[in-house]
Image (cartoon, coloured by chain):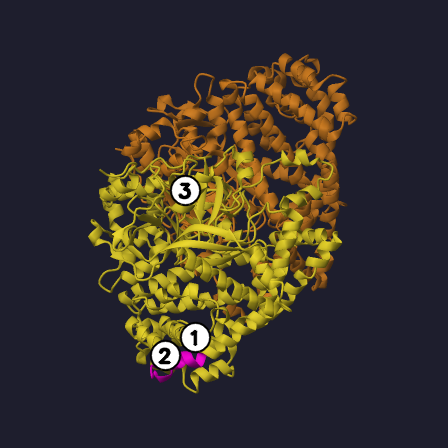
Chain colours: A orange, B yellow
Amino acid sequence: MNYKRFWIMLSMVIISIFLLNAAAPRPDEGMWTFDNPPLKLLKDKYGFEPTQEWLDHIRLSSVRFNDGGSGSFVSMDGLALTNHHVARGQLQKMSTPEKDYVKDGFYANTQADEIKCADLELNVLQSMDNVTDRIMKVVKKAKNDKEALELRNAESAKIEKESLKKTGFRSDIVTLYNGGEYWIYRYKKYTDVRLVFAPEGGIAFYGGDPDNFTYPRYDLDMAIFRVYENDKPIHPKHFLQWSEKGADDGELVFVSGNPGSTERLSTIAQLEFLRDYQLPIILKSLNRRIEMLKQYSLRGKEETRQAASLIFGMENSLKANQGEYKGLLDKNIFEKKQKEEKDFLALIANNPEWQKEFGGAWEAIAEASKKQSANFKPMIFRNLRGSRMAQLALMTVQYVAEVTKPDGERLEGFHDAQLETFKFNLFSPAPVYPQLEEFRMTDGFKETIEELGAEDPFVKTLLNGKTPEEVAKELIGGTKMADPEFRKKLVEGGQKAIDASDDPMIIAAKKVDPFVREMRKKMEDEVQSITASAGEKIGKARFAAYGKSTYPDANFTLRLTYGTVKGYSMNGTIAPSKTTFYGLYDRYYSFDTKPPFNLPQRYLDGKDKLDLTTPMNFVATLDVVGGNSGSPVINKKGELVGLVFDGNIESLVGSYVYDEETNRTVSVHSQAMIEAIRKLYNANGLVDELTAREPKK
Amino acid sequence: MNYKRFWIMLSMVIISIFLLNAAAPRPDEGMWTFDNPPLKLLKDKYGFEPTQEWLDHIRLSSVRFNDGGSGSFVSMDGLALTNHHVARGQLQKMSTPEKDYVKDGFYANTQADEIKCADLELNVLQSMDNVTDRIMKVVKKAKNDKEALELRNAESAKIEKESLKKTGFRSDIVTLYNGGEYWIYRYKKYTDVRLVFAPEGGIAFYGGDPDNFTYPRYDLDMAIFRVYENDKPIHPKHFLQWSEKGADDGELVFVSGNPGSTERLSTIAQLEFLRDYQLPIILKSLNRRIEMLKQYSLRGKEETRQAASLIFGMENSLKANQGEYKGLLDKNIFEKKQKEEKDFLALIANNPEWQKEFGGAWEAIAEASKKQSANFKPMIFRNLRGSRMAQLALMTVQYVAEVTKPDGERLEGFHDAQLETFKFNLFSPAPVYPQLEEFRMTDGFKETIEELGAEDPFVKTLLNGKTPEEVAKELIGGTKMADPEFRKKLVEGGQKAIDASDDPMIIAAKKVDPFVREMRKKMEDEVQSITASAGEKIGKARFAAYGKSTYPDANFTLRLTYGTVKGYSMNGTIAPSKTTFYGLYDRYYSFDTKPPFNLPQRYLDGKDKLDLTTPMNFVATLDVVGGNSGSPVINKKGELVGLVFDGNIESLVGSYVYDEETNRTVSVHSQAMIEAIRKLYNANGLVDELTAREPKK
């Protein structure tokens, strides 16, 4: 029984538990770990009992895109489906001033035509084990929170390293239920990923920023990659069969993917920190940076191409964060969260043992949140912002320093088990745009000065009397960090090479590194160590009070979500559960064909070839958040019926609460993808591969 | 300078008046009388200066549909355009169990095929004169509010009668600015109105109750009548030329029509009465009656036909009233209204003369509102409800009694100048459905008992120990009131015939009449007389404080409204300024062709004939409310570019406030009407007549 249920119970004490269980079905809420799927809920509400094989099949068909999204295997020859907006970073990296794959799309007629991604790592979750006891046993010995954090980190690194060594799989310690549980998750890792198909950006992101996070919607937000090993396509044992019919209105569907982050189990103090410090600062900064990038774009076509994906990403963050912020400012929502916490606290207080063990945790977090507020701005702004080359320089400087230490003592991200992925990113051949970097870095300095003041020691050290323009020009103009071979040589040369380097960006990174480490340490000592220990207590308290009938907050690990294809009340009327291609053309002509409601030429030339009644996008009561982008929507038979790409505007408060009445996941319909690929892109080979039921002869 | 502007001034005292006038343009707010058009606003904001001829042409092309809507002349042979939902009552009255014009539509191939309406009166505003001074001169003599009401009513009746006699035009006293002004409005009246064209109900009201008052929208909510005199089509000197192009995004447009009722100048006490008494009672009753009618419809196809228009009307009222209620419950809106009143009161209080003359008015209205609250339920429920035959019986009984009195002493509605219209309605040949009447009357009695209690003297008198079922059966089963000839004979027979009648409905009406008169009297003495006098004071105070730079509240008299064709922020994104036929089919297929999103067969068979890019509906910042339905949307050239049929969901608070950001009028695009009539209804003769630029040879 989760705490929400419990609250209902408290207010309905007269009604028997049996009656209550038979009452209104529990909403389709929850991002469930695969070790604890909501079997009873599914059986009670939908009469569906997934087998362990079904669950394993779904899990092993699910692919995490480490650029920040999800996906799935969709063919026996290793095709992996995700969103265009998840693929966008890689599309940008393969593009050139002459060939803009983001804007113009791509289709590889043959495997030889497929384009390798610069630095895309995919993960498939192979197994997971609960290591809570092992970690707790070590942490127990700590004399204080600070020591507990060190011991916890060291033991985690040790478990990861052991697991990697034993299985060869990428092995990550995963914290669930605020520290109520620790798990080791093992992933099969793929780093040779090649682009097969992407539609034009204009149809993938039809309606642009205005339509983003809204519905009804008309996006073909898809991209297809092929996964290789040893230069050959893989043949995954598990992949999702394509449902050409898709899901009907009212049908039970599932999503398997990696929701990025939620705050549903956070304390009120943590939510207040978000509301009163973090989100206002982030929103302000995003607005500024978007404005600057738009100014940069005005310079010309190539500048527009360079900045487009950055603007997309920031506008996406802005709209999402605005929705979250609005949610926290909503008195009804906040009062609901306050009541939940109050009831939880009352339950703990009623049991002297619990009170003794867990009672102080909320207060401790509240104290830590105050420190977090005080440190938040310097933590954000005392850094080299707005330049990828600067980030690479800092990574290089820190890498060289960290790897000489014992594994357990290194900064998070530099443990032995993490180094392969770290170096994959550090040595990425992805292009950099020096002109754009200089522009962004200049404004990044200016923003830092405005936020921290000219007398901040970081500002003084970094600028050393020069103007932001001068420093940015010097650093970007003089560095060789754009070259991956240069980075490799520095890393190979170790501390000596770093110390000897006259590359201005390396020199700047060395100056910045102590500030970054200082803020990191401060946050660890004053915030993380306390919230980690207190979180563990709250996690245990929750299990004690409510059992394990709920799901942990999202943290970009694989989750299973269930729901119904279903419209909702919206704008005074009803939103239908699906849209059609007719609606795409309605929106196009309604806005007089103006951007962002214009269409790629292909969609105008080919309009008569399309069956306009084909479902295009659809909504379901699936509980997802950012990170789930690209997740497959799956029917009871385990077939792919859709591709998650968004939530509606009402879902943006989903970080804190889920409301089945209005929260909807927006997905591309499986029919729409086939219809478009076949009729407009004439990619029949691809359609055949996606829809194949039996291995090819 | 209106009071809103003044408020801005108070808060910006430092800024000079000149600067202020040059600041942000005033929103497109206002339902302006034709004697006081917003010439300066139009010139300042749009650089448009309508001539008096332009204004006269618009006014004389505008047609009031006395069923509760607006319309316009649109051809030289007397075609009048309005909404299907304005025509709906008449369509219902011409329909039979065999031929349902509401559902199936109608087109008269020749003038001989046109169907005469049972009781539709159209009015065209010919002239208007300010009679404030004349009325005030008389009212001034009154010793108290009660006497003032009597004198005001008597003088009004006298002016109306004189005007009618002198001009032959229907002459109505019109109260503006809460009594700040009184006018005599003179109308040319038409009572021979014949149906030429109506589309199927399913396309006129596409999307049904869910889509009602929303946008984006896809309705062909139109009907066309021809106006006759002496059995021949009239040739109006003024009619609107049809614009086949319609209005562009961003274009300045106008509406000339008859907004029914607003409460923008009402006092806080009056709004509180609406919020706390009137609206909750009305909403409850509407919900109940809709539910009952839906039960009745379940009995069969003919029952469904009989109840359909009633359900439509009540659902329409329900949604509108819910929107208004929500507006009054919105703290921001209410606080805005409170601040407006507070500022107004402060301004009055600052001037000792004003304070002496007007100061007590708000208090007086507050006192009257309390009385109104106490009397509201008996006033509503002490009546014969749910039966047209009962209403006709009561009209007959009252008519016979009133006409023997001197004109000035009669009940409102029975003055000499009003009798022609009264009798037109009383002797209407429109069909009645006894089975439906009995069903509704039975539940009407039950509702009255529930609301007033079984011991209420009205209930006891009416039921006299019998059950509601028994009484309704007796009355409906025994009456001959369905027959207009029967009514005529009673009226001709006068009081003697009434007294001698053994018709059970007449007997019941005689029993009910004293209760109705008592409540009416009570309301006059305790509420109307006070609010009329106080309203006059507030009206004068407003002129004194702000001048005549504002518009009076709506009261179903002709008003001019201006605005821009413009989308708006909605649902997290932007609503386009127009929709297209593509969107109609999107909605059809999105909802799996299910009602109310199904389509008439003609729209499926004829889909390929349509140019789906044709604009269908559009929105503009025009400030309209119910009663404006059917109004023409007019461009600067005085051409018809659209047909008002609704407001968006955000416009429902328009009774109290206008917000240009989101308040939108929804209209049928002039292109859509021509496209459908020509391609789907093959009514080329009608298209030719509508689009003719020169008289036919």
Drawn side of residue B332 relative to residue B88, left or right: right
The residue carrying mark 2 is: B505
Q: Chain of mark 3?
A: B
The disc, 2 or 1, on the residue closer to the chain's N-terminal end is 1
Residue A605 found in image quarter? top left
The answer to whether residue A450 of the structure is visible from this angle is yes
Residue furthest toward the bottom? B465
From the top left corner, tell me how far across and down residue A431 is, in percent: 52, 19
| Amino acid type of the residue tagged 2 in the rendering | Met
The residue carrying mark 1 is: B404
Q: How many marks?
A: 3
From the top left corner, tell me how far across and down residue B545 is, in percent: 67, 49
- Placement of A195 over or under B610, stated as above or below: above
Mark 1 surroundings within 10 Å by alpha-carbon count, few (fewer than 14), some (14 through 19), many (20 or more): few
The residue carrying mark 3 is: B57
The disc, 3 or 2, on the residue closer to the chain's N-terminal end is 3
Disc 3, SS = helix
| Amino acid type of the residue tagged 3 in the rendering | His
